Amino acid sequence: MKEATDDFDIQSVLQYDLNNNVNYIKTLFHDCSDFVIRSIIAGDRKACLFYIEGLINDDNIQTHVLQQLLNHSQVETFDFNNLEERILSIHGVKEINKMGEIINSILDGKTALLVDGKNIAIILETKGGKQRNVSGPETENVIRGPREGFNENLGVNLALIRRKIRSHRLKVISKKAGTETKTGLAIVYMEGIASPDLIQEVMNRLDRIKIDGVLESGYIEELIEDNPWSSFPQIQVTEKPDTVAGNLLEGRISILVDGTPFALIVPATFWQLIQSSEDYYERFHVAIFLRTIRLFLIIIALLLPSIYVAVSTFHQEMLPTALLLSLANSREKIPFPAVVEALIMELAFEALREAGIRSPKVVGQTVSIVGAIVIGTASVQAGIVSAPMVLIVSLTGIASSTIPRFNIGNSIRMMRFPLMILAASLGLFGIMVGLVVLTTQLLKLRSFGVPYLAPFTPISVQEIKDTLFMRAPWWHMKFRPINIAAKNLKRERSNQHPSPKQSAGILKRKHDSGAEEP
């Protein structure tokens, strides 16, 4: 066995001498106090268990491995060939003889069993250790709908999706990313619904990733999106298993990353990112109302400060006389132009938002609320900003908080600042120029080949039923998105429309005939 180095030969195989194998592995894991080597005698053979403390389930090691092997130590001959069938009572047992695969398995939370006189290692599925329990999502609160959210364990997250979709057509492909972290990835899709070309494209983009570490799904998102220079996200991020399941059934693909509760969904469109999972759990009348309100608030979040700056600076004639006089009176002692006022208050609001997020929970909300009140009141009394500007920024902040997805919300908040500068320079014309540039950028964007503003570009009447402020009843949404699903476009049988008149007639006939009513 050659001397171990940091870049050990992953193709090197085990030797028959156990001592040489142990010395080699010890060299690789020197100065690793959590690395455990447990020597045992089983029959006429010496054996060693290798694992990392904290990554394994101690009960599995003690009950299903050590106890079974030590009980077998009374036997004169160690039966290596029947180890899996007759001795070990643990699931997930496989044989490996390459040193690189053995080391990676140990680092992945598994246990390696090496026996003297054999150049094959037994890899035991003993993953465990402490982990966060399944709890509600922190970024996607709902009133109606499932309350469970992903956690940092990849296996748990896959199980949560399996509980939603109990189908053999739900496929999971495992990969590793990061030369040092070797982070586990899972590509999840529905066979027969997801496009094979889309699946292959996702695989190709993941295979192109060459980086030393992946610590969160944000690494993957930035490395595989179509246009990394755009401020708008082209991949949906979610903590909710039901959101992932719903998108899988439409033909999309989800990428789960070990160590983070945030799953990625591709492809994603703009309308998809401003929708909430709760839209599909409420009756369609309520969903349409909520989506209409949400769209109106998104427009406010993007344009309200810019419109105020443009009107108060260039287009005072658009205001009623009483309102104009009130505005002029409030700004009489303000030393700054409207755009400076807006920038000061917007930056202060963003600072308070960040302080509320980064502070401990017990004080974060207090910091945000009290800070906003104190800063707003003090600024008006000091004559730095006017009272209407405080009102405008407050309404804008409230509107920003109604956007369901935090990543698209961040993009809309960022767009406010260049629009305010354009409004201060060119008035309403500047806002229109900014909106034209913004719309052009959105029209050019693609998410894994799907137009970002689909189904409006290109137009698809069938898919418009579930975009913008529309949410048709389920019995009218018979087909999956044409731009995403490759085949099996029909997702429900015909004649799903409720027929209350027919049901009433059946009940009436039963009642008239004297049958027991249900």
Image (tube, rainbow, N blue to C red):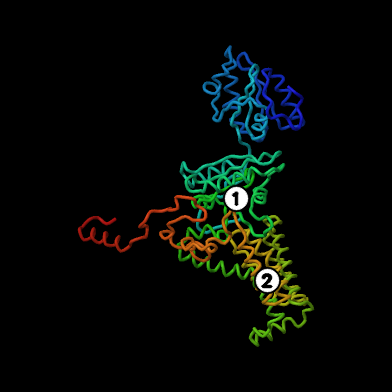
Q: Nearer the viewer, residue 98 or 512?
A: 98
Q: Quadrant of the N terminus?
A: top right
Q: In percent of the image, x 30 and y 60: which residue is there?
A: 503
Q: Residue 130 at x, y = what percent? A: 63, 39
Q: Is residue 506 left or right of residue 302?
A: left
Total count of labels: 2
Q: Amino acid at mark 2?
A: Val
Badge 2: few (under 14), some or many (20 or more) residues near its Cα, within 10 Å? many
In this figure, which residue is indicated by the disc labeled 1?
Answer: 264
Q: In percent of the image, x 71 and y 30: which residue is there?
A: 35
Q: Residue 110 at x, y = what percent? A: 62, 32
Q: Residue 351 at x, y = what percent? A: 73, 63
Foreground disc of the pair 1, 2:
1
State which quadrant residue 126 falls in.
Answer: top right
In this figure, which residue is indicated by the disc labeled 2?
Answer: 393
Q: Nearer the viewer, residue 239 or 11?
A: 11
Q: In percent of the image, x 66 and y 31: which residue is there?
A: 106
Badge 1: few (under 14), some or many (20 or more) residues near its Cα, within 10 Å? many
Instruction: Report helix, strand or loop for mark 2.
Output: helix
State which quadrant residue 494 falls in.
Answer: bottom left
Q: Amino acid at mark 1?
A: Leu
446 is higher (above) or lower (below) than 54:
below
Instruction: Report helix, strand or loop for mark 1.
Output: strand
